[in-house]
Image (spheres, grey):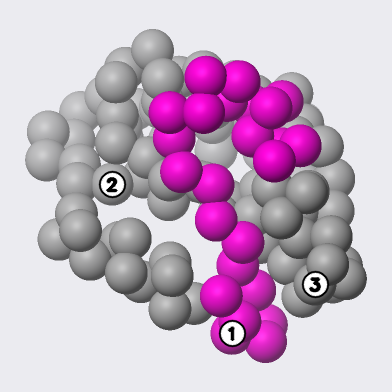
Amino acid sequence: MSKSEQVKVGQFIEEYLAKRQNISLIVFLVDIRHNPTENDKMMYDYIIKNNLPCIVLCNKSDKIAVTKVDDRIKELQCILNPLKDILFLPFSSERKIYTQSVWTEVEKYI
């Protein structure tokens, strides 16, 4: 995605979140294989500053060894959420692993 498209998408998301009154939960996706980008950090800061309900899904968890998933989740949480007051969960949309724990959490907000 080009820089100008990224700006447009960012503006769209920010406008939507500002105008929408009944947000039950934001499911924020990050790639477990990479550290958060500057855009990820900006979006996360926006969510926190506006006190929006959020969980973070660390997607592509099937792409790393199962034995490394928990440690990587902790690393990502330390980068984005050092207070550890937001839930970070592994997820794989491709292989559909870790989905039960995600749905259990999402259902708490429905």
Q: Is residue 9 shown above or below 92?
A: above
Foreground of the two, 46 or 62: 62
Q: Residues within 10 Å of mark 2 (few under 14, many from 20)?
A: some
In the rendered image, residue 78 lying in the magenta stretch gets the answer yes
Q: Element type at marker 2?
A: loop
Circle 1: residue type: Lys
Residue range (magenta): 74-98
Residue with the mark numbered 3: 66
**Distance (Cα) linking label 2 and label 3:** 27 Å
Q: Position of residue 96 (x, y in %)?
A: 59, 85
Q: Quadrant of the C terminus?
A: bottom left
- From the viewer's perspective, is 24 left or right of 88? left
Circles 2, 3 touching at the beta carbon (< 8 Å): no
Residue at 18% from the left image edge and 35% from the top image edge = 20
Q: Quadrant of residue 81?
A: top right
Residue under pointer 2: 25
Disc on the earlier residue, 2 or 3: 2
Q: Residues within 10 Å of mark 1 (few under 14, many from 20)?
A: few
Callout 3 amino acid: Val
* Amino acid at pointer 2: Leu
Q: Could you say where residue 25 lies in the image, as x and y percent from the top left?
A: 28, 46
User: Relative to residue 88, is residue 7 drawn left or right?
Assistant: right
Residue corresponding to mark 1: 96
**Viewer-proximal residue among 82 and 34:** 82
Q: Closer to the camera, 63 or 17?
A: 63
Above or below: residue 9 compared with residue 68: above
Which of pointers 3 and 1 indicates the residue nearer the eye?
A: 3
